[in-house]
Every structure is written in structure tokens, then in C-alpha cells.
Image (cartoon, rainbow, N blue to C red):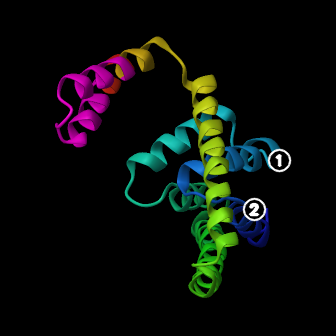
């Protein structure tokens, strides 16, 4: 695989997504598992889980990991730049444009219309994980966290994460 191809795959994902890391998951899955077979479905599920628990954005972490696996340090750099450069360029262009059109009625309607699309894309990520990772252990962890949040709603969310990690460690051994 060429570094340019690796960079272009991640640039395509960056250009086609709107709404952050979870919105990238279905498109990442399509590109990395189906179109280019960089990963299997199980490897992809593990990748997203790993990208969530490591500091930084999911898209960047995923690109760096896949790039490293496919092309070493140069691959990691190419994939990371591929996912970052389009976002930077688009963000700068949108910032300039929004500054001029922020009060326009058509812009408010456009932004209102984008929200359901983002919710749908994130919903697709939920369906993907439900399909690939649904198991009794996951149901136990989910139920425990829901119960914890219901009984102690003001508890710091880090405790939910800690409980999930502990239960995951115990149940998946």
C-alpha cells in the first residue's frame, strides 16, 4: 500500500463526516473493513474501543493506529495527516463563511437540517456496535452503569467509566 493511498482513505473519511468522532465510525467501518480490508469487523470494533479510551479524538487515534499497522511510522504520519488536513482546511473555510452568513435565515435552517443527519450517523454507529459487540457481558456492564447513574445521578461520570473498566476486566477474563 502506498502512503498516498493511506492518506487519501483517511482524507475521504474526514471530508465525508460531520459531527465528530462517533459520526466517523460508520464511514470508517465502510472504508477500513469493506472497501480496503485494512481490518476485520472484530479488529475494527477493537480499534474503536481502543480509540475511545486513549486520549485524543477518535478519528485521529484510529488513523494513527491503522496507519502504523499498515505502513509503520510513515503510515501513521500519512493517515494522521489525511484525517487532520481536510478538517483544518474545511474548518477555516467554514469559519470565514459562517462569520459572514451567521445571521442569514438560510444558514440557520441549514444548520437545523444537519442536526438530524448527525444523529442518524451516530445512530448507525450504535447499531454497528450492537451488531458486533452484543453479548451478555456487555449487557451486564450497561445495566450496572445505568443503575449507578440512576441511583447516583450527580456522581462524577469517571466513576461510571471506572465501573465499566472493572467489570470489563472481570467479565472478559
> What stretch of residues is rendered in magenta?
142-167
Looking at the image, residue 74 lies above or below residue 146: below
Looking at the image, residue 14 lies above or below residue 161: below
Quarter of the image for residue 77 reads: bottom right
Q: Residue 1, image x and y in percent?
A: 79, 62
- Residue closest to the far top: 136
- Residue closest to the far front: 105
Looking at the image, residue 10 lies above or below residue 101: above
Give the Cα separation between the discs numbered 1 and 2: 10 Å
**Dot 1 lies on which element?**
helix
Whether residue 112 appears in magenta in the rendering, the answer is: no
**Dot 2 lies on which element?**
helix
Q: Are marks 1 and 2 in contact (CB under 8 Å)?
A: yes
Whether residue 157 appears in magenta in the rendering, the answer is: yes
Looking at the image, residue 124 lies above or below residue 11: above
- Residue closest to the far right: 35
Q: Which residue is mark 2?
A: 9
Residue 107 or 98: which is nearer the viewer?
107
The tag earlier along the polypeptide, 1 or 2, is: 2
Q: Main secondary structure of the magenta part?
A: helix
Q: In what quadrant of the picture does the C terminus appear? A: top left
Q: Residue 11, image x and y in percent?
A: 71, 68
Residue 105 or 58: which is nearer the viewer?
105
Give the number of marks. 2
Q: Which residue is mark 1?
A: 35
Residue 105 or 130: which is nearer the viewer?
105
Quarter of the image for residue 14 reads: bottom right
Amino acid at each position: 500500500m502506498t502512503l498516498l493511498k493511506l492518506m487519501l482513505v483517511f482524507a475521504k473519511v474526514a471530508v465525508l463526516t460531520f459531527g465528530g468522532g462517533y459520526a466517523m465510525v460508520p464511514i470508517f467501518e465502510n472504508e477500513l473493513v469493506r472497501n480496503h480490508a485494512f481490518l476485520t469487523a472484530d479488529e475494527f470494533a477493537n480499534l474503536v474501543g481502543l480509540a475511545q479510551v486513549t486520549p485524543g479524538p477518535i478519528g485521529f487515534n484510529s488513523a494513527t493506529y491503522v496507519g502504523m499497522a499498515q505502513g509503520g511510522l510513515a503510515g501513521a504520519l500519512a493517515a494522521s495527516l489525511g484525517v487532520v488536513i481536510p478538517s483544518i482546511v474545511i474548518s477555516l473555510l467554514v469559519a470565514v463563511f459562517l462569520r459572514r452568513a451567521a445571521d442569514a435565515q438560510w444558514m440557520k435552517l441549514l444548520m437545523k437540517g444537519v442536526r438530524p443527519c448527525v444523529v442518524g450517523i451516530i445512530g448507525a454507529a450504535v447499531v454497528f456496535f450492537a451488531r458486533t459487540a452484543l453479548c451478555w457481558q456487555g449487557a451486564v456492564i450497561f445495566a450496572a452503569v445505568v443503575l449507578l447513574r440512576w441511583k447516583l445521578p450527580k456522581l462524577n461520570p469517571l466513576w461510571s467509566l471506572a465501573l465499566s473498566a472493572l467489570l470489563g476486566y472481570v467479565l472478559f477474563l
